Amino acid sequence: MAEHVIGTIADFPVGSSTVVKIRTIEIGVFNVAGTLYALPNICPHQYGPLCTGGVNGTMVSGPDTDWQLEWGREGEILTCPWHGIEFDITTGQALANPRFKVRQYPISVVDDKVTITLGS
Ligand code: FES
């Protein structure tokens, strides 16, 4: 395991999405409501640059919405720019297709430094 400092917390403000490169690996870093997530910049569908896609919300329905469809989860959903598959940034899971899920790299903040841990 190797830790890589990718910047300070000020480099990744709330709502930001940034692609960083560690060695040859491109990683998307997302700040969702103050929590950082790191996902591979490669889509499991046809290998598009997933993390360069838009970050938005999606339609939700449940007890909180009285089972009506409403827009929600703003800032938590990443849309692949190639074919539009939506992924939950907080889990890596595609919303509409359980076959597609991306891993999450361990990311942490210590003394304002943001670190991603990669396997050796
Ligand atoms: S390559 Fe990402 S949706 Fe097709």
Image: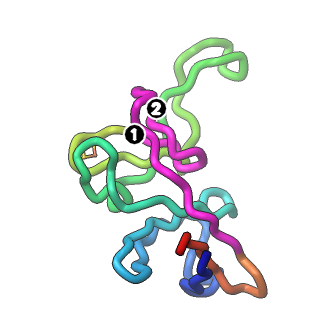
Whether residue 62 appears in magenta in the rendering, the answer is no
Spatial distance from mark 1 to mark 2, Cα to Cα?
A: 6 Å
Extreme-front residue of the structure: 120
Q: Name the residue under label 2.
A: 95
**What is the x, y in percent for residue 70?**
54, 25
- Give ligand 1's quarter of the image: top left
**What is the x, y in percent for residue 69?**
53, 19
115 relative position to 27: left or right = right
Q: Tag 1: residue type?
A: Glu
Q: Which residue occupies the foreground of this view, 74 or 99?
A: 99
Circles 1 and 2, Cβ within 8 Å, touching? The answer is yes
User: Magenta span covers which residues?
Assistant: 86-108
Give the prevailing secondary structure in the magenta stretch: loop
Would you say residue 25 is visible in this rendering?
yes
Whether residue 93 appears in magenta in the rendering, the answer is yes
Extreme-top residue of the structure: 67
Quarter where residue 25 is shown = bottom left
Q: Residue at the location (34% across, 78% down)?
A: 24
Which image quarter holds the N terminus?
bottom right
Q: Which residue occupies the foreground of this view, 96 or 45?
A: 45
